[in-house]
Amino acid sequence: MKNKKIIFIALDCSVLKAKSIIKSIPKIKLKKYEIGIKAGYQILYSDKGRNFIKSLKGYKKFIDLKLNDVPNTVKNGILSLRDLKADYITIHASAGSDAIKLAKKYSGKTKLLAVSVLTSMNKKNLSEIGHTKKLDKLVIHLSKLAKKAGAYAMICSPHESKKIKKLSKLPSITPGIRLPGDQSGDQKRIATPKFAFDNGAIGIVMGRSLIKGNIKNNFKRLFQHLDS
């Protein structure tokens, strides 16, 4: 099946823990979905992190560093990551169109995912740092900027995917995903996997709901939920 939806496992942990998680992922054939790996600061900044990412086979690889700097520094960051042969790398849309355009120019086959507003933030948090736009309007504004600058997709909350697809013509990958009944943790704009996919997300990012406790049982819960 072409265009399978992607379930990214968030490896926000040590390399040792990440290897244990990878071993625990059930080996099952999926018709509608494929499994991806999201690696962030903790792995990328560790001594063995880059080698670990290079060693991953059979997974979509998502490097989540949320690049946000002057255009030339962003370009150099992209160039330093090219040897990892990632499928996706994140850049903050708020870095601006020049940074996104330059990142795209040097990213090779790696697709750029533009981060809109972190799912750990709400209206109060935005006001605190000086934003005057309403949250949903800010997300749409950033998605239009990212589309024009050449980003492949948006990173946004599941509640914004449908509107972004309609108004900006960009697909989305959504963090802040929890299985029904799971605690939200430090996330504020959350939703279930089924809600995210039903609202147009091409991929979701899941951490605690999948990797905390019995991973095989968590995957079983996930696919029961998606098939319900």
Image: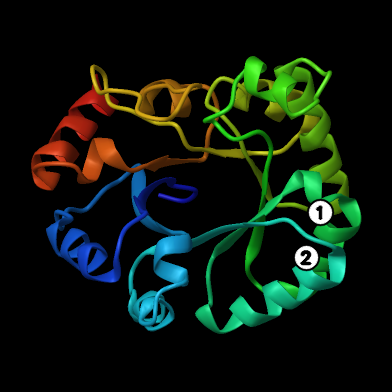
The vertical placement of 163 against 110, above or below, is: above
Q: Is residue 220 left or right of residue 52?
A: left
- Closer to the camera, 90 or 86? 90
Above-or-below relation of 28 to 102: above
Instruction: Classify mark 2: helix, strand or loop.
Output: helix
Q: Residue at x 52, y 40 (%)?
A: 202
* Residue 181 in which image quadrant: top left
The residue that mark 2 highlights is 104
Give the quadrant of the C terminus.
top left
Judged left or right of residue 20, residue 124 is right
Residue at 26% x, 19% y is 180
User: Could you tell which of marks 2 and 1 lies nearer the N-terminus?
Assistant: 2
Residue 89, position in %: x, y?
60, 61
- Image coordinates for residue 3, horizontal then vertical, percent: 49, 48
Residue placed at 21% from the left, 63% from the top?
17
Mark 1 highlights which residue?
Answer: 150
Figure colour scheme = rainbow
Q: Secondary structure under badge 1? A: loop
On the image, the x and y values in percent for residue 100 come to 81, 57
Identified by mark 2, the residue type is Lys
- In this view of the protein, which residue sits in the foreground, 36 or 16? 16
Task: Tell me whether circle 2 and circle 1 mark residues in contact (CB < 8 Å).
Answer: yes
Name the kind of residue labelled 1 in the image.
Gly
